[in-house]
Amino acid sequence: MSASPLLSVKDLKVSFGRKKNQTEIIQGVSFDLKPNSILGLVGESGSGKSVTSLAIMGLLPAKTSQISGELSFEGQRLDQMNPKELRDLRGREISMIFQEPMTALNPSIRCGKQVAEVMKLHLGISSGEAKNRVISLFNQVQLPRPKSIYRSLLNPLRWISLSERSTSRAVVGSSATKSLGLQASAIAIITRCICPPLS
């Protein structure tokens, strides 16, 4: 018997604009992501891959975008959640690596603190435990000198974006790596962090 989908998208349509001046960008996208699996959306630049990711995460501008279809995570309708419900789910259960992850961190705040804040918010753990977990995650995503990077004000590598998401059960990536070599490394790291080994 096949497992129920972790993430399900059915007949997703996305339009931008106001009233009569709407342009449909996404036209009926459907797919299921099973637990402990990887699914890729392939298309040329401008085909709507990033818009699909943003729609799933509930991050499209409400005033200028119209979304129809069903978006479900573990049977919960994402498209019917209010903003608070989505915030509670994002980062804890489902996360996103943005198209330009190297701009995702604030360069005036220490790298480790920014990642630790996500853990404290969603996991309810102490600052000390969050710090230990962040350093451990920096190790998992193969950052050199993780303790030094924790204290750093610099935005060292896109792998920090991966570590922020590695406690989630589903990770949505929007062209997060530019080269095939980095794509392979990123997929391997995410798989190791969020998918348990098969018995």
Image (cartoon, rainbow, N blue to C red):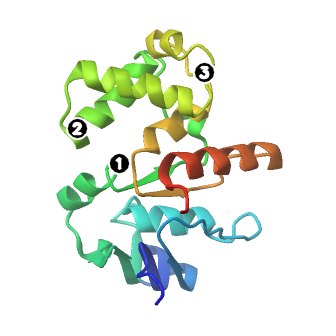
Quadrant showing the C terminus: bottom right
Do we see residue 128 in this rendering? yes
Instruction: Name the kind of residue labelled 1 in the image.
Output: Gly
Q: Which of the two discs, 2 and 3, labels the residue nearer the N terminus?
A: 2
* Inter-mark Cα distance, 3 to 1: 21 Å
When the figure is inspected, residue 181 is found, relative to residue 80, above or below; the finding is: above
Q: Secondary structure at mark 2?
A: helix
Do we see residue 18 in this rendering? no
Q: What residue is shown at x 81% (from left), y 50% (from top)?
A: 180
Please state the horizontal and vertical placement of residue 5, each as a whole percent of the image. Answer: 43, 78
When the figure is inspected, residue 1 is found, relative to residue 36, above or below; the finding is: below
- Residue 154: assigned label: none
Instruction: Name the kind of residue labelled 2 in the image.
Output: Leu
Q: Secondary structure at mark 3?
A: loop
Please state the horizontal and vertical placement of residue 162, each as a whole percent of the image. Answer: 54, 40
> Would you say the residues marked 2 and 3 are in contact, meaning their CB atoms lie under 8 Å apart?
no
- Residue 91: assigned label: 1
**Dot 2, crowdedness within 10 Å: few (<14), some or many (≥20)?**
few
* Inter-mark Cα distance, 1 to 2: 9 Å
Residue beneath disc 2: 121
The answer to which image quadrant residue 134 occupies is top left
Q: Nearer the viewer, residue 112 or 21?
A: 112
When the figure is inspected, residue 111 is found, relative to residue 8, above or below; the finding is: above
Q: Which of the two discs, 3 and 1, labels the residue nearer the N terminus?
A: 1
When the figure is inspected, residue 141 is found, relative to residue 30, above or below; the finding is: above
Residue beneath disc 3: 156
* Inter-mark Cα distance, 2 to 3: 23 Å
> Would you say the residues marked 1 and 2 are in contact, meaning their CB atoms lie under 8 Å apart?
yes
Q: What residue is shown at x 48% (from left), y 83% (from top)?
A: 12
Q: Secondary structure at mark 1?
A: loop
